[in-house]
């Protein structure tokens, strides 16, 4: 029974060790996945907060522009240009394409508005639109937009002629709060890249308004090419040579490819099965941010230890198995040798016992012979002693007879 246990012990320990190794491997993978999830969720939150913060700075800038409009009886094109130049958009607000002022214009008043605007250093100003909202009663016209060099194509554009822009502008006017449009293409962008606009409604306060209540003046608005905006948001991340994820930004609460605003990849990376996304509100709209972990970076970063545990554990258990197997074989061989030596010793003892018995018998026979010999010697001795005594008696008689004869001879008279 013990032999079976000792022989089975290496295999039992091998199986147990492999099970423990797999458990540690899976546990390390779970920790890796948990750490990865935490890492990507943190990155998502960080990027989202950065987007929210930057959005707030842009909206604050537009609120300041709206205050500049609302606090003045009239703002000329030259004054607007100076105001925007003082803001240093490219330095202080990276990613923004410009800062503009749009006004609602009744269709009946459009000719008068055009002529008035042309007199303000815009000789070629013309209202034009896309004609996608034919039932609209008014135009939402871009009156000012700086820097003009990269935005001149947008001057005079009726943003109300396109449903997406019009919906955002009406939402901003009705709520009195900033609103972000859905994905659009800027008219001034020759590359037709995904873009969006932020609208901040401008109201003249009661003190400056001619009538009671607030007077709506128009919108301070900012156009953004989404890629330029996100490059500003991800400035630090994009500088990293081995960023373990790619970034996508979608317009809306879902990852709809038709509403993709930005992607940080040119060729879609070989990603893992997991993606991480979050949807969040942005000024009367909803955006979705998604991270795509890159397989090569994720594997190199986190799973090395897990596979070291797996392969190292397998190798260690195999070595331990062969070591214990060698010990078991050594023990088995030792026991076999001991058994063989025991048999040989038993045979040797039996031979020795047989030889001892034979020797004993020989000695017994010798002893018997010696006893017989001693008995014969004793008998011979006794016989000799009797004979000696008899001879002595004869000799004594002869000596006595001689003595008597001698006495007779000495005494002649006798």
Image (spheres, grey):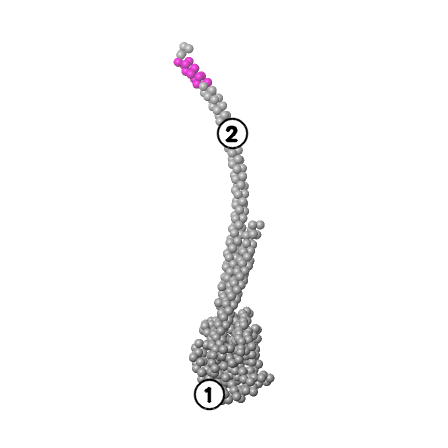
- The reply to whether dot 2 and dot 1 touch (C-beta < 8 Å) is no
Name the one closer to the observer, 72 or 19: 72
Q: Which label was assigned to residue 18?
A: none
Name the one closer to the observer, 187 or 392: 187
Whether residue 297 can be seen here: no
Residue reaching furthest to the left: 410
Residue reaching furthest to the right: 135
Where 77 sits versus 346, above or below? below
Where 61 sits versus 368, above or below? below
Other residues around mark 1 within 10 Å, as few (<14) / some (14–19) / many (≥20): few
Other residues around mark 2 within 10 Å, as few (<14) / some (14–19) / many (≥20): few
Q: Which label was assigned to residue 375?
A: 2
In front: label 2 or label 1: 1
- What is the x, y in percent for residue 298? 50, 68
Range covered by the magenta-colored residues: 397-410
The residue under the point 51% across, 73% down is: 247
The residue under the point 43% across, 79% down is: 86
Quadrant of the rendering where the C terminus is positioned: top left
- What is the x, y in percent for residue 43? 50, 69
Name the one closer to the observer, 54 or 397: 54
Indicate the secondary structure of the residue bearing disc 2. helix
Distance Cα–Cα, label 2 vs label 1: 168 Å
Q: Is residue 60 magenta?
A: no
Q: Earlier in the sequence, mark 2 or mark 1?
A: 1
Q: Main secondary structure of the magenta part?
A: helix
Indicate the secondary structure of the residue bearing disc 1. loop
Whether residue 343 can be seen here: yes
The residue under the point 42% across, 13% down is: 408
- What is the x, y in percent for residue 91? 43, 77
- What is the x, y in percent for residue 205? 50, 77
Q: What residue would you read off at disc 1?
A: 121
Q: How many numbered discs, if any?
A: 2
């Amino acid at each position: 029974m013990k032999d079976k246990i000792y022989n089975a012990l290496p295999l039992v320990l091998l199986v147990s060790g492999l099970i423990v190794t797999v458990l540690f491997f899976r546990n390390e993978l779970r920790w890796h996945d948990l750490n990865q999830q935490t890492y990507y969720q943190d990155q998502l939150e960080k990027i989202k907060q950065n987007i929210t913060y930057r959005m707030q700075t842009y909206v604050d800038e537009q609120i300041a522009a709206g205050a500049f409009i609302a606090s003045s009886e009239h703002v000329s094109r030259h004054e607007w240009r100076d105001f925007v130049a003082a803001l240093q958009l490219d330095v202080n607000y990276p990613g923004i394409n410009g800062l503009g002022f749009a006004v609602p214009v009744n269709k009946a008043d459009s000719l008068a508005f055009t002529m008035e605007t042309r007199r303000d250093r815009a000789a070629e100003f013309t209202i034009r639109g896309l004609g996608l909202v034919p039932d609209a009663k008014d135009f939402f016209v871009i009156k000012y937009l700086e820097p003009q060099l990269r935005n001149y194509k947008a001057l005079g554009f009726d943003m109300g002629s396109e449903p997406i822009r019009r919906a955002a502008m009406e939402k901003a006017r009705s709520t009195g709060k900033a609103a972000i449009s859905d994905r659009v293409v800027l008219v001034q962008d020759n590359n037709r890249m995904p873009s969006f606009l932020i609208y901040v409604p401008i109201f003249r306060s009661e003190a400056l308004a001619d009538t009671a209540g607030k007077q709506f003046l128009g919108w301070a608005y900012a156009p953004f090419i989404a890629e330029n905006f996100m490059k500003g948001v991800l400035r630090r991340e994009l500088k990293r040579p081995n960023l373990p994820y790619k970034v996508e930004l979608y317009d809306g609460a879902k990852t709809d490819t038709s509403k993709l605003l930005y992607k940080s990849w040119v060729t879609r990376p070989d990603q893992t099965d997991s993606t991480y996304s979050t949807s969040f509100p942005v000024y009367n709209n909803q955006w979705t941010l998604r991270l795509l972990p890159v397989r090569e970076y994720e594997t190199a970063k986190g799973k090395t230890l897990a596979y070291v545990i797996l392969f190292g554990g397998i190798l260690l258990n195999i070595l331990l198995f062969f070591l214990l197997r060698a010990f078991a074989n050594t023990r088995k061989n030792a026991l076999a040798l001991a058994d063989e030596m025991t048999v040989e010793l038993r045979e040797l003892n039996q031979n020795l016992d047989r030889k001892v018995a034979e020797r004993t018998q020989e000695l017994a026979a010798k002893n018997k012979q010696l006893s017989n010999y001693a008995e014969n010697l004793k008998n011979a001795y006794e016989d000799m002693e009797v004979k000696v005594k008899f001879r002595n008696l004869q000799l004594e008689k002869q000596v006595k007879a001689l003595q008597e004869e001698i006495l007779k001879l000495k005494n002649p008279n006798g």
